[in-house]
Each structure stands twice: as C-alpha cells, then as structure tokens.
Image (cartoon, rainbow, N blue to C red):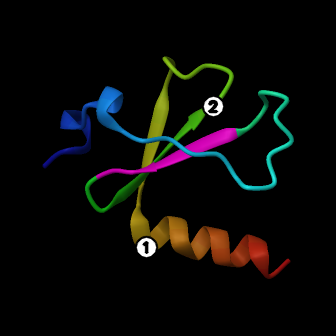
C-alpha cells in the first residue's frame, strides 16, 4: 500500500501525554507500518509519514537527551 493511499480520515490520532493542551502540538497515528504526523492546529492540512522504525529511532534519541 502506498502512503498516498492511506485514508487520513480513518486514522486514530493522539498527542503526547505531556501535551499542555494549548493546541500547539503534533499528533501521531499508526498508518500501515508508518507513523503519520500532523500539526494539531491544522488537522486538515499537510501531514507527513515516516517508516515506523525511523520514527522509533527519532523518539528514542529525543528521550535520551
């Protein structure tokens, strides 16, 4: 399945547990072995998709800082 064929309306989005609720967060969703990322201020706007392993490496790196 191509990333472009993912129906963004069917994704279940979530914010970080430490989000302060001011609307200035990113939201993520699992999407066919990828992680979709969007801006919570503009949920109907552009979104990006990363391979799940790349996203996991990114998150691990951030947690280690």
Where in the figure is residue 5, as x and y percent of width and height? Answer: 18, 35
Magenta stretch holds residue 5: no
Residue that label 1 marks: 53
Which label's residue is closer to the chain start, 2 or 1? 2
Q: Quadrant of residue 33?
A: bottom left
SS label for mark 2: strand
Please indicate whether residue 38 sits to the left or right of residue 18 in the image. Answer: left
Segment tinted magenta in the rendering: 26-31
Residue lying at 52% horizontally and 65% vertically, measured from the top left: 55
Q: Position of residue 29 (x, y in %)?
A: 45, 48
> Label 2 belongs to which residue?
39
* 30 part of magenta stretch: yes
Quadrant of the image for the C terminus? bottom right
| Secondary structure under the numbered disc 1 in the rendered image | helix
In this rendering, the count of numbered labels is: 2
Measure the alpha-carbon separation of dots 2 and 1: 21 Å
Q: Residues within 10 Å of mark 2 (few under 14, many from 20)?
A: some
18 versus 6 height, above or below = below
Q: Find residue 24 and report its horizontal and vertical position in percent.
A: 79, 31
Specify whether 7 is left or right of 19. Answer: left
Q: Residue at x 82, y 35 (%)?
A: 21
Residue at horizontal 70 percent and vertical 53 percent from the top: 16
Q: Position of residue 19 (x, y in %)?
A: 80, 46
């Amino acid at each position: 399945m191509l990333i472009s064929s993912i129906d963004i309306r069917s994704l279940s989005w979530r914010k970080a547990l430490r989000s302060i609720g001011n609307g200035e967060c990113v939201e993520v969703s699992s999407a066919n072995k990828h992680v979709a990322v969007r801006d919570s201020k503009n949920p109907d706007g552009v979104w990006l998709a990363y391979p799940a392993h790349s996203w996991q490496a990114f998150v691990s790196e951030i947690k280690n800082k």
